[in-house]
Image (cartoon, rainbow, N blue to C red):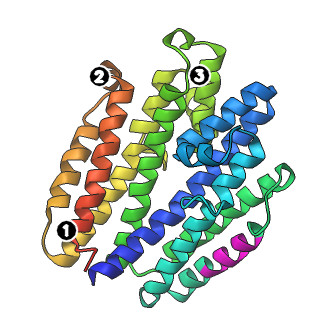
Amino acid sequence: MLGRAANGVFWLFRYLERAENMARLLEAGFRMALTRGDADARDEWASVAITAGVRAGYEAKHSDYSGPQVFNYILRDRDNPGSVLAILGKARTNARMVRAGLTREVWESINEAWMRLSEQLARPVRETNLGTVLDSIRRESNQVRGATAGTMLRNEIFNFARIGKFIERADNTARILDVKYYVLLPAVSYVGSSLDNVQWDNVLRSVSAERAYRWLNAGRMDARSIAEFLILDGRFPRSLAFCYAKLRSNMASLAQDYGTENPCHELLRNADVQLHGLTIEQIFDQGLHEFIGKFIAGNQLLASQIQADFRFNE
C-alpha cells in the first residue's frame, strides 16, 4: 500500500473521530452551562474552548465567552482551521483521495455526512437547535463507523483506519481528563467540593461515560475511581486501556500483512506494557497530571513513528 494512501486512510478516520469528540465536548459544556448562572456559564464555555484547544484563536477574535460565540467558533467559524466543518471537509477530501480503497457504503456514508452537516452548518447555530446539530454529528459518525465495520475487508486499509481512530480517541480522552480537571479546578482546596464533583461529572459527560461509570460504581463520584475507569478499565470503549488494546491488535495485523515489524511496533509494545502494568495508586503517586502529560507525548510519538515507518509522505 502506498504511503500517501495509508496516510489518507489514517487521517480520514482521525478527522472523523475528532469531529465526534468535539460534538461530545460541546454537548457536555452546553448541559453544564444550562444549570449554572451567567458568570459560571461563561466559565464553563471557556473550559470548553480550552479543552478543544482553540483558546488562542478564539480570544483573538472574541473578548467574551458566550455560548453561541463559542459553539459557533468550534463548529463552523471560517477563522478556525480546526472547526468541525473544516475537519469534516478534510475527512471528505481524504476519502476522495483513497476512494478506491473504500467500499461504496463507506464512501457514500462519508459523502452524505459531509453534505448533510455542511448544510446544517451553513448558517449560525442557535441554542435552540444546537442539540439537533450535535446529534447529527454523532449520528453521521456512527453511520460511517457502522459502514466501515460492516463492509470493509479486514486488510491493511481497515487496520490503518482503526489505528487512526484509536490514536485520536486516546488523545482526546487523555486531554479531557487532564484539562477539564487539573487546568480548570481553581485550587487544591476545592478537591472534594461541589465544584470538584461538577468537574468530574463533566469529565464523564465529555466522553459519554456517565451512565457506564455510575452503573459500575453505584453512583460513587471520586477522582480516583473515575480516573481508574477512564485510564485502566478495558471494558469502556473510550478508556486509554481499551484504545491501546485495539491499537495492539491492528498493529499486529499490519505486521502479519507485511511480514515484519517496524520500530513503531516496539514503541507500542513498550507503551502498552507500561499502561497495563500500572495501578491507579501508582498513577496518583507519580501525579495524574504528570502521567497524562507523558501519555499524550508518547501517543504523539507513536503516531509520528507510524507515519515514518509506513512512509506516509511518499
Vertical placement of residue 15 versus 155, above or below: above
Residues 233 and 74: in front is: 74
Residue drawn at (39%, 70%) of the image: 10
Q: Quadrant of the N terminus?
A: bottom left
Of the numbered discs 3 and 2, the one sitting upstream in the chain is: 3
| Label 2: how many Cα within 10 Å (few below 14, some 14–19, many 20+) | few
Nearer the viewer's eye, disc 3 or disc 2? 2
Visible residue check, residue 32:
yes
Question: How far is the residue under mark 2 from the one under mark 1?
Answer: 32 Å
Q: Could you say which disc has been placed on residue 220 in the image?
A: 3
Q: Is residue 118 magenta?
A: yes
Q: Residues within 10 Å of mark 3 (few under 14, many from 20)?
A: few
In the rendered structure, find residue 309 and report the number of the disc placed on it: 1
Residue placed furthest toward the right = 128
Residue type for callout 2: Gln
**What segment carries the magenta color?**
111-119
Q: Quadrant of residue 8?
A: bottom left
Residue type, mark 3 in image: Arg
